[in-house]
Amino acid sequence: MLKRFTNYLLWLWVFLIPWQARWIIVDPVLEGSVWEYGRLSLYGGD
């Protein structure tokens, strides 16, 4: 039973990971390049 549940979770993970989206709300620049840690983003999944 646990193996079957784990298998379902694995397949769910494989199919859902590529269908994520990220909307960048604020994209700060630090010394001429984008500062990744300062980004304000909204994540969504399909």
Image: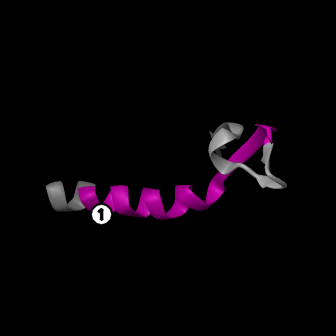
Residue 31 is situated, as x and y percent measured from the top left of the image, at 80, 51
Q: Is residue 37 in the magenta section?
A: no
Left-right relation of 3 to 44: left
Of all residues, the one furthest to the front in this rendering is 31
Element at label 1 = helix
Where is residue 38 shown, x and y percent of the image?
67, 39
Of residues 3 and 42, the one nearer the viewer is 42
Task: Determine the image quadrant of residue 23.
Answer: top right
Q: Name the residue carrying label 1.
A: 7
23 up-or-down from 5: above or below:
above
Q: Quadrant of residue 42?
A: top right
Our reading of the magenta stretch's main secondary structure is: helix
Q: Quadrant of residue 27?
A: top right
Q: Residue furthest right?
A: 32
Q: Position of residue 6 (x, y in %)?
A: 26, 58
Horizontal placement of 33 versus 40: left or right?
A: right
Picture quarter with the N terminus? bottom left
Specify the amino acid type for callout 1: Asn
Residue 45 visible in the snapshot: yes
Asked whether residue 12 is drawn in magenta, I would say yes
Which of the pair 2/26 is nearer the observer?
Answer: 26
What residue is drawn where x is 30% and y is 63%? 7
Residue visible at 79% across and 41% down in the picture = 28
Instruction: Inspect this view and state whether residue 1 appears.
Output: no
Which residue, as the protein is rendered here, is positioned at the far left? 1
**Viewer-proximal residue among 32 and 18:** 32
Q: Please report the bounds of the magenta region as a residue range.
A: 6-28
Badge 1: how crowded within 10 Å, few (<14), some, or many (20+)? few
- Residue at horizontal 18 percent and vertical 62 percent from the top: 3
The residue positioned 70% from the left and 37% from the top of the image is: 41
Q: Position of residue 46 (x, y in %)?
A: 65, 46
In front here: 39 or 7?
Answer: 39
